[in-house]
Image: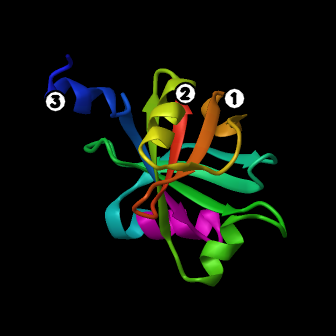
Amino acid sequence: MIAEDRLAELRTIESKFNHLGVAVPDLQQAGEGFERLFGYKLIRGPYADPIQKVLVCFIGKPDTDLVIELVAPGGENSPISNYLKKSIGGYHACYEVPDLECAVRTAQSQGCLMIGEPVPAIAFDNRRICWLFTPMRLLIELVEQ
């Protein structure tokens, strides 16, 4: 018989926080605003991702591990446009996982809904990502290590 604490451990996803995603109408304007307000600098990007239909870049500060992914529409049918129409900025948290399939199965066993099949992402050197909605109505992105 498995102890209760071990059972709980088996139901969690092995992960490391990667970044917080923020929807913005314009990468350059938003980047400049974060720099003026908080001293954030461009870490990498920008990237155009035709699969996700977005433009992205990553910003941060040398004295902190927090990374923010600025995400702007990459065309007319970009899913980010819906967030911007609703005035939603911060909209997802991303976690890096060693085994994407295992993480998705674990998430689904805990009531998460997979939005689409895993796909390669340009911003992560074509490592696969997967989007899920949690039972708490949060959007999470999983990226394979």
Q: What is the x, y in percent for residue 104?
A: 53, 35
Query: What segment carries the magenta color?
Result: 21-34
Element class at badge 1:
loop
Q: Are marks 2 and 3 in contact (CB under 8 Å)?
A: no
Kind of residue at disc 1? Asn
- Give the left or right position of residue 9, taking residue 50 as reference: left
Residue that carries the numbered disc 2 in the rendered image: 100
* Residue under label 1: 126
In the picture, the quarter occupied by the N terminus is top left
The front one of 107 and 16 is 107
Query: What's the CA distance linking mark 2 and mark 1?
Result: 14 Å
Q: Is residue 25 magenta?
A: yes
Q: Quadrant of residue 9?
A: top left
> Where is residue 132 shown, x and y percent of the image?
55, 49
Mark 2: which secondary structure?
helix
Using a 10 Å C-alpha cutoff, classify the residue at mark 2 as few (fewer than 14 neighbours), some (14 to 19) or many (20 or more).
many
Residue positioned 47% across, 70% down in the render: 33
- Looking at marks 2 and 3 on the same chain, the residue that comes earlier in the sequence is marked by 3
- The residue singled out by tag 3 in the image is 4
| Vertical comparison of 97 with 86: above or below | above
**Which comes before the other along the chain, label 3 or label 1?**
3
- Counting from the top left corner in percent of width and height, residue 143 is at 54, 34
Query: Label 2 vs label 3: CA separation?
Result: 25 Å
Labels 2, 3: front one: 3
